[in-house]
Image (tube, rainbow, N blue to C red):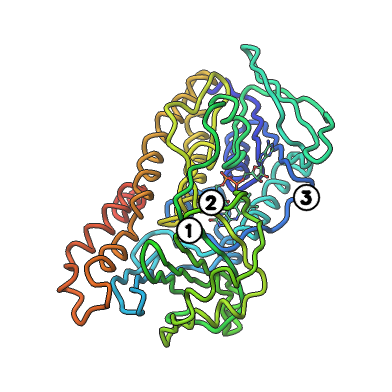
């Protein structure tokens, strides 16, 4: 029987909200503290892999997910000329018991927020509360909040534990690792957009084109647009750029003139990249960054979760999915361990190493490394793919990543 009766969750992003739902279901009294005054549907598309969809399904969110996201049917890698390198079925199509969803991050967040408020009560989420400082007394944690805009102190709260799901610029991580500095720049910038367009391939396909220094990703995210014969296409253009932009801010809008010309010849027939970029109104810039894996997330009654614990390159569709797996692991540990401290240590033990492995593997391009291999071996394209990379090599790379990231089909389906 757990000794954790109450929890403060810092951050009302994907990780924080799912953790709130999980702990509440397990009988813990939860409050979420979110820095922004109003949570808005920000961000563009993300993917939820079947292992994360399993967690959300067990939390009773299957129907909401089905109404919000589009089940991804296949993943395709092509080179910069649009020649196919790899195709694999995804989600239910690939025999998983749970779908993979392509979903608008902001709509997912709003769906989770609604669920938290419905189940925990409207006042379970305190917006406009930016964590400033905190201390542990031995029996509990006391957290002090400010209004981020004005700096004004707005109150202190106490709970048995504090879970920091406060994202890549985590205040709590910074408290324990004050010398860590800025996130680590990969040398690549992501420009992201979302626009209503015409469906391509199966209408539920996720495609990645190019190679490490010049890449384009596209997938549709909206079930309602799909029902109308349209596609709300999420896309990401990626280029190697020596100098890191001054801000690591998910919502920094930029002029697409900055990168669009690099993709002007990428009309593959089945997908017209320059047209897609042209059709898009708002484009957001984000430097691809991560942080080195930490030796420790848990300090007594305080722990880190999601991007605060293990920010990773958005490769292999794992950022949000891993935060959701954290939520499940911390809930299970709290139920199984007798003390708050041992629960948070057990959670760290279960999750730290697997997520560190993904951080490292994503630095090597994760499963997308096959696109880089093909570029290096045949920069002018190919007549026969087998002359460039064997089918077995492709299969091995795809399977290895799934095992490391925890969504190997046969293992997952046994859960
Ligand atoms: C506005 C926004 C847009 C994003 N857009 C994309 C996207 O388009 N594509 C993509 O792949 N990923 C995006 N992400 C990141 C993605 O959501 C995460 O990588 C992943 O879902 C893990 O979630 P998380 O809960 O750990 O972190 P996040 O989803 O980043 O949530 C962290 C939350 O903590 C809050 N917070 C931060 N500091 C404090 C504090 N001191 N006190 C209280 N609250 C605090 C933040 O406001 C935020 O709501 C975005 C994140 C944000 C915040």
Q: Position of residue 148 (x, y in %)?
A: 77, 38
Of the two numbered discs 2 and 3 on the same chain, state the one appearing first in sequence: 3
Which residue corresponds to mark 1? 241
Which disc number belongs to residue 284? none
Q: Position of residue 305 (x, y in %)?
A: 53, 37
On the rendered structure, is 298 left or right of 6?
A: left
Which disc number belongs to residue 38? 3
**SS under mark 2:** loop
Which residue corresponds to mark 2? 244
Identified at 43% across, 74% down, the residue is 205
At label 1, counting other C-alpha atoms closer than 10 Å, the crowd grade (few under 14, some 14-19, many 20 or more) is few
What's the distance in space between the residues labelled 1 and 2, CA to CA? 7 Å
On the rendered structure, is 39 left or right of 372?
A: right
Q: Give yes or no for contact between labels 1 and 2 (Cβ–Cβ under 8 Å).
A: yes
Observer-side mark, 3 or 1, equals 1
At label 2, counting other C-alpha atoms closer than 10 Å, the crowd grade (few under 14, some 14-19, many 20 or more) is some
Observer-side mark, 2 or 3, equals 2
Identified at 58% across, 61% down, the residue is 63
Q: Is residue 220 above or below residue 57?
A: below
On the rendered structure, is 207 left or right of 331?
A: left
Q: Could you say which is closer to the camera, residue 190 or residue 392?
A: 190
Q: Is residue 370 above or below residue 278?
A: above
- The count of marks equals 3
């Amino acid at each position: 029987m757990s000794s954790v009766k109450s929890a403060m969750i810092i951050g009302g992003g994907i990780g924080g909200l799912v953790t709130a739902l999980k702990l509440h279901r397990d009988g813990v009294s939860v409050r979420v503290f979110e820095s922004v005054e109003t949570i808005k549907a920000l961000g563009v598309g993300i993917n939820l892999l079947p292992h994360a969809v399993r967690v959300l399904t067990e939390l009773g969110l299957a129907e909401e997910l089905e109404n919000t996201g589009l089940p991804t049917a296949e993943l395709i890698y092509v080179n910069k000329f649009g020649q196919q390198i790899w195709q694999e079925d995804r989600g239910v199509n690939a025999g998983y018991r749970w779908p993979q969803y392509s979903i608008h991050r902001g709509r997912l967040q709003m769906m989770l927020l609604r669920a938290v408020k419905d189940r925990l009560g409207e006042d379970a989420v305190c917006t406009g509360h930016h964590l400033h400082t905190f201390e542990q007394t031995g029996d509990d944690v006391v957290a002090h909040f400010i209004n981020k805009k004005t700096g004004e102190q707005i109150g202190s709260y106490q709970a048995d534990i504090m879970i920091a799901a406060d994202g890549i610029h985590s205040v709590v991580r910074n408290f324990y690792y004050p010398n860590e500095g800025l996130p680590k720049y990969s040398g690549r910038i992501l420009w992201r957009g979302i626009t209503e367009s015409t469906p391509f391939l199966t209408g539920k396909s996720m495609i990645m084109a190019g190679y490490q220094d010049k890449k384009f990703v596209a997938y549709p995210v909206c079930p309602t647009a799909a029902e109308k014969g349209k596609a709300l296409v999420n896309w990401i253009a990626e280029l190697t750029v020596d100098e890191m932009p001054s801000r690591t801010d998910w919502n920094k809008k930029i002029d697409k003139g900055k990168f669009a010309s690099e993709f002007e010849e990428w009309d593959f027939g089945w997908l017209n990249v320059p047209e897609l970029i042209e059709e898009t109104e708002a484009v957001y810039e984000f430097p691809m960054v991560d942080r080195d894996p930490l030796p420790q997330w848990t300090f007594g009654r305080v722990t880190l979760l999601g991007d605060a614990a293990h920010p990773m390159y958005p490769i292999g569709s794992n950022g949000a999915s891993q935060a959701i797996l954290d939520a499940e692991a911390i809930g299970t540990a709290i139920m199984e361990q007798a003390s708050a401290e041992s629960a948070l240590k057990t959670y760290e033990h279960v999750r730290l190493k697997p997520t560190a492995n993904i951080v490292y593997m994503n630095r090597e391009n994760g499963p997308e490394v096959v696109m880089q291999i093909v570029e290096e071996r045949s920069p002018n394209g190919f007549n026969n793919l087998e002359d460039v990379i064997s089918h077995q090599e492709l299969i091995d790379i795809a399977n290895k990543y799934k095992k490391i990231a925890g969504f190997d089909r046969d293992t997952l389906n046994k859960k």
